[in-house]
Image (tube, helix red, strand yellow):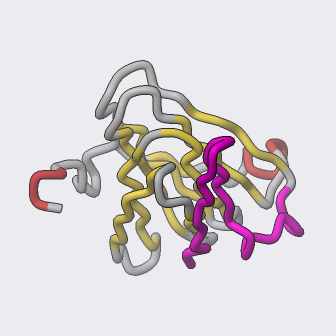
């Protein structure tokens, strides 16, 4: 599921928004900023947790994999075109920043304690989507 956003620009600056996103089930969020470009953080899955990805600065390649079918989906998220991507339960996710100074905010519908027993890790090359030349 994609929550499309937009932006508004005037003499004061830029306003990015995703008005269709509802925070009703969100229990926590965290922000990720990699130290170097093209750094891969993958793969992290959950059977019961749903996550939502938003890029507040820069651009990332986001991958998601259905853990039952191994169907892969890829998205480019950029602060210049705001949107939120939902990573449903029973999926793994991973991302790579494509620009310097990228900031990604991840929202979760589980507390940290609730997600600890629902943590599935895979090697970052298990689903090797990171070659962006062919994207």
Task: Quarter of the image for the C terminus: give it.
Answer: bottom left
- Please give the name of the residue rendered at 41% of the width and 55% of the height, measured from the top-left corner: 62
- Please give the name of the residue rendered at 71% of the width and 53% of the height, measured from the top-left corner: 107
How far from the left and from the top, in percent, is residue 44? 51, 49
Judge whether residue 16 is colored magenta.
yes
Task: Quarter of the image for the N terminus: give it.
Answer: bottom right
- Please give the name of the residue rendered at 74% of the width and 55% of the height, measured from the top-left corner: 108
How far from the left and from the top, in percent, is residue 38? 29, 34
Question: Which picture quadrant has residue 118?
Answer: bottom right
Figure check: 51 above or below 101: below
How far from the left and from the top, in percent, is residue 46? 61, 59
- Please give the name of the residue rendered at 45% of the width and 73% of the height, measured from the top-left corner: 66
Asked if residue 25 lies left or right of residue 55, the reply is right
Figure check: 39 above or below 90: above
* Residue located farthest toward the top when viewing the structure as drawn: 35
Figure check: 51 above or below 55: below
Q: Magenta span covers which residues?
A: 1-26
Judge whether residue 72 is colored magenta.
no
């Amino acid at each position: 599921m994609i929550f499309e956003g937009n932006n508004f620009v005037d003499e004061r600056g830029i306003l990015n928004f995703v008005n269709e996103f509802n925070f009703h089930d969100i229990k926590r969020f965290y922000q990720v900023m990699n130290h170097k470009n093209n750094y891969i953080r993958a793969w992290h899955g959950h059977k019961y947790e749903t996550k939502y990805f938003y890029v507040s600065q820069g651009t990332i390649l986001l991958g998601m994999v259905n853990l039952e079918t191994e169907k892969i989906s890829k998205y480019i998220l950029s602060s210049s075109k705001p949107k939120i991507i939902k990573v449903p339960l029973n999926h793994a996710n991973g991302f790579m920043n494509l620009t310097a100074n990228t900031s990604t905010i991840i929202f979760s519908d589980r507390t940290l304690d609730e997600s600890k027993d629902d943590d599935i890790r895979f090697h970052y090359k298990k689903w090797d989507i990171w070659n962006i030349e062919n994207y």
